[in-house]
Structure formats: C-alpha cells, structure tokens
Amino acid sequence: MTDSHHARIKLGLAGACLLLGLSLAADEAQSTRVDGPRFVPAEEVDAQGPSTAHVAIEQFQYSPYQIKVSPQTTVLWTNRDGVDHDVTFRDGDVKSPLVGKDGKIAAEFTEPGEYAYYCHVHPFMQGTVVVE
C-alpha cells in the first residue's frame, strides 16, 4: 500500500469515529489540562459548599444544559439514569470515568471560558459550563 492509501484509511477512520462520537486518542491524552477543567474525586467534594454547582444527568440529558459559575467552582454531575454516562470535554477530549446510577463526577474550574462537553457513550447528550 502507498502512503497516500494509508492516509486515506486514517482519514476515513477518523471521520467514522467523529460521526460515532468516538475518539482515537490514547489514554495518556485523556489527562487533565493545566488551563482547563480538572477532574477531582467526587467523594472529596463538599456537595453543600458555596463553591459547588450541580448538574443532573437524567433522561439522557444534562440539566441544566448550560451552567454559569465563577472561577474556583467545582461542578458536580449526578447520574440519575439507569445507564452509564461520563463527561467528556470537547477541548482536548478530556473525559471522566463512566458512572452508573447515582454516580457522581466532579470537575474544578479555575479559568474563565466556555467549556463544552458531551457523553462519549451518548454523543447527542451535550452541555456547557461557562466560567465568568
């Protein structure tokens, strides 16, 4: 096979993965970025604390779809569905582990910006955290 043929195969696989909401990134690429949200152990988050915001995962949706928070806020997602979900940030394709019913995912936000995310298992599920 020629280099051109290999390139077309890679491009075709990347396109198929994009359509299916999958990622070709290696596990090492899923580490958290320094300037973006950072996943933290949910069990260490003060769920009632003043710097914690809540998003429910229910009926295959993030609710609210968009949440506005201040810098230094932790967002806590709680899965109310009977199937596994995660939170995958579009910028850098950083994702949390999958969590089942009543599972929690937590991420700290320190830098202002708009952080779009989705569930990599159900890519039609989308949301945004706006830090201002």
Image (tube, grey):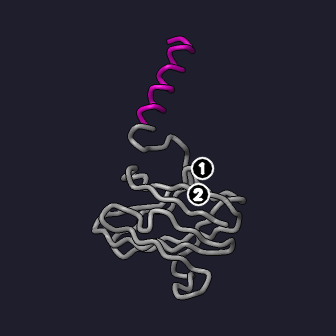
Query: Looking at the image, is 96 positioned above or below residue 29?
Result: below
Residue at which label 1 appears: 91
Q: Main secondary structure of the magenta part?
A: helix
The tag on residue 51 is none
Instruction: Give the image quarter of residue 74.
Output: bottom right
Please say if the residues under marks 1 and 2 sit with CB atoms less than 8 Å apart: yes
Specify which label sits upstream in the sequence, 1 or 2. Answer: 1
Q: Nearer the viewer, mark 1 or mark 2?
A: 2
Q: Residue at x 44, y 61 (%)?
A: 86
Q: Is residue 8 magenta?
A: yes
Q: Which residues are magenta?
A: 1-17
Relative depth, front residue between 124 and 88: 124
Residue 63 appears at what percent x and percent y?
41, 68
Q: Residue at x 63, y 59 (%)?
A: 32
Type of the residue with mark 1: Asp
Query: Looking at the image, is 80 positioned above or below residue 129?
Result: below
**Quarter of the figure that contains the C terminus:** bottom right
Q: Residue at x 62, y 70 (%)?
A: 108
Relative depth, front residue between 90 and 63: 63
Residue at which label 2 appears: 115
41 relative to 21 in the view: left or right: right
Mark 2 Cα shell of 10 Å, populated few (<14), some (14-19), many (≥20): some
Tell me how many marks there are.
2
In the structure shown, which secondary structural element does the residue marked by tag 2 occupy? Answer: strand
In the structure shown, which secondary structural element does the residue marked by tag 1 occupy? Answer: loop
Query: Looking at the image, is 27 positioned above or below residue 39?
Result: above
Residue 1 appears at what percent x and percent y?
50, 12
Residue 59 appears at what percent x and percent y?
30, 65
Q: Residue at x 49, y 76 (%)?
A: 54
Type of the residue with mark 2: Tyr
Query: Label 1 to label 2, Cα distance in Å?
Result: 7 Å
